[in-house]
């Protein structure tokens, strides 16, 4: 286990959703697939952006997924495939450091279980 932690980075994936319900659906799908160890939903955000030439102002929920580097592409693909937005913000950033116990837990939670 410690070799995996030493060799692979912890990565956070950030996206937003239009509601807590949608955020929860995205979080459950990714965590149940073991593509992330955890997802934190942060309601109460307000987004201001331009879309189709008009200024928009909408309530949003941020979702922060905790995962490992080798799961990032699959997790981002799953989020995109299940996201209701035409152009969702989905981005990943690597942790520069992590507590060893936390890193080990993320690695364990994102390791596929054998079906035997």
Image (cartoon, rainbow, N blue to C red):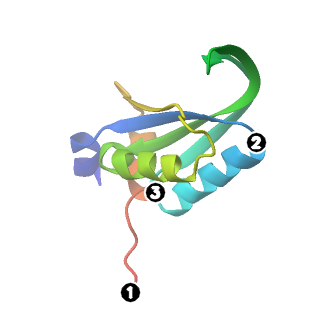
For label 2, the SS is helix
Mark toward the start of the polypeptide (2 vs 3): 2
Crowding at dot 1, Cα within 10 Å, few <14 / some 14-19 / many 20+, comes out as: few
Q: Tell me how far mark 2 sits from mark 1, CA to CA.
A: 36 Å
For label 1, the SS is loop
The residue under the point 63% across, 45% down is 84
Q: Tell me how far mark 2 sits from mark 3, CA to CA.
A: 23 Å
The residue under the point 26% across, 50% down is 4
Q: Is residue 37 visible?
A: no
Q: In the visual, does 24 lie left or right of 111? A: right
Split into 4 quadrants, where in the image is the N terminus?
bottom left
Which of discs 2 and 3 lies nearer the camera? The answer is: 2
Taking 34 as reference, is 62 above or below it? above
Q: Tell me how far mark 1 sits from mark 3, CA to CA.
A: 18 Å
Q: Where is residue 34 shown, x and y percent of the image?
A: 47, 59
Taking 68 as reference, is 111 above or below it? below
Residue on which disc 2 sits: 20
Residue on which disc 3 sits: 109
Q: Where is residue 50 shown, x and y percent of the image?
A: 62, 15
The residue under the point 45% across, 35% down is 12
Which of discs 2 and 1 lies nearer the camera? The answer is: 2
For label 3, the SS is helix
Q: Which mark is residue 116?
A: 1
Mark toward the start of the polypeptide (2 vs 1): 2
């Amino acid at each position: 286990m410690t070799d995996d932690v030493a060799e692979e980075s912890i990565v956070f994936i950030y996206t937003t959703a239009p509601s807590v319900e949608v955020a929860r659906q995205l979080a459950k799908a990714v965590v149940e697939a073991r593509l992330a160890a955890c997802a934190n939903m942060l309601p109460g955000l307000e987004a201001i952006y331009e879309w189709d030439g008009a200024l928009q102002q909408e309530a949003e929920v941020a979702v922060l997924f905790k995962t490992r580097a080798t799961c990032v592409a699959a997790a981002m693909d799953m989020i995109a495939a299940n996201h209701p937005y035409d152009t969702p913000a989905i981005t990943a950033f690597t942790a520069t450091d992590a507590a060893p116990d936390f890193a080990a837990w993320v690695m364990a939670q994102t390791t596929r279980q054998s079906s035997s």
